[in-house]
Image: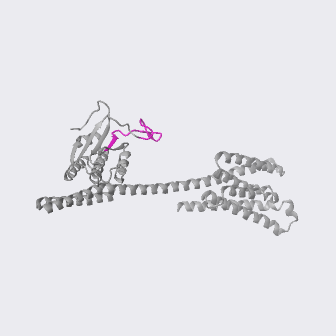
Amino acid sequence: MAVRRLTAFTYAVFLLVALGLTVTVFPAAGDTPWARSAPAWLVVAVPLVAALVAASVNVLALRTALHPGEGPPRTVALLGLALVAYVPSLLLGVDWLAWTAVLACFLVVVLPLRVAAALYVAGLLLQLGLWRLAGEDWRSTIFAGVSYVATSFLLAVLLRALTTYQELERARAELALAEVLRERVRVSRDLHDLLGRNLTAVSLKVELARRHQRAGREDQLRTELDEVLALSHAAATDLRALVTGYRALSLESELGAARRLLGDAGIGCEVDADPSALTAEAGPEVSEVAAWVVREATTNVLKHARASACRISAHVVDGELRLVVSNDGADAAGVPAQTGNGSGLLGVRERVRSVGGRVDVRSAAGTFELSCTVPLARPGLQDGRPTGRPAGGRTRGGRHPGGRKVGSR
């Protein structure tokens, strides 16, 4: 709404300027040589038609400046302005050259600065020269030059202010769209990360319950069904957290859940980490990212491997949290391949990169390994990139000799 009002105001200002220039030209047109012998109606009609044509061309040029792609091409618009600014002066006298201020305004706004400056100065010198050639004294000539500069400057400021405001509004709309897209990515990522593990666990628990039912183990059957109910409640809680836009994970709870879930699936799980010490050392932001990695890695093992053993290791070494999840059975027949290119692992990469870390995936000899390295101290930014890092923003991998372990056991 504000842009439309400013645009309408700008059009009104340019039309008022055109009206003022027309009123100025009418008295002078009657003193030209051809007007002395021409009929009165022709003396009125010629400047009026010329003014209407000039105003129409100015409106089209203004449309080109304010709405690129909708008006005539830039070159055509400027050529039309030059024609209506200079050609009618052959009949109507040098007073008509006041229209050149409008041409100068569009030169400044539409063209690159160097080209516009050269043409602007050339137009000013031409204005002064034509006034002198017409026999006007220096006072009138200087006044024409000052009018040229003042009018073109004021119109250019108005037009530039409007185009800048339009650009700001477009940038604001693009930022709003980008924010919507980011929120969509967050929702889809959180849906996968939050519900994927729970749904996989429900499937596993239901399968175990069916085995207990076939074997007649009623107590174990009731236990598995109770856990299915608990998992469904947890999924509902996760959905409510997703709606509110925030879902905090605990590294300790995720490590415990991974151990239990993998154990229920018959996968031996070794955890080499002390989550309490890691959280105290790494801080809540980094430890929460590590919790997300553990959750997705656990889901990845259950869905894409026929594993018999899994190992989760997390340590703080030389100011970095290093988390590694490895499993066997990556090339087992009858299960999807662990490639590291799934949507879940893409979400893991986004989360780790958001805190300045990196994710590495390795698969060889039936073993799949997901590792992430996250710096505990976020580096400062210099020239748009983290200081002390390569241009790609990646941390240096590898284990430093004599690295200090915190919270390992």
Residue 375: within the magenta?
yes
320 on left or right of 109: left
226 on left or right of 113: left
> Going 74% across and 47% down the picture, which residue do you hit?
122
Residue 320 rendering spot, x and y as whole percentages:
32, 38
- The vertical placement of 316 against 219, above or below, is above
Counting the numbered discs, the total is 0
The quarter of the image holding the C terminus is top left
Residue 211 rendering spot, x and y as whole percentages:
17, 60
Residue 196 rendering spot, x and y as whole percentages:
29, 56
Pick the front one: 165 or 178 = 178
Hey, which quadrant is residue 90 in on the image? bottom right
Pick the front one: 144 or 392 = 392
Pick the front one: 170 or 273 = 273
Residue 397 rendering spot, x and y as whole percentages:
36, 37
Pick the front one: 326 or 60 = 326
What range is drawn magenta here?
369-393
* Residue located farthest toward the right when viewing the structure as drawn: 37
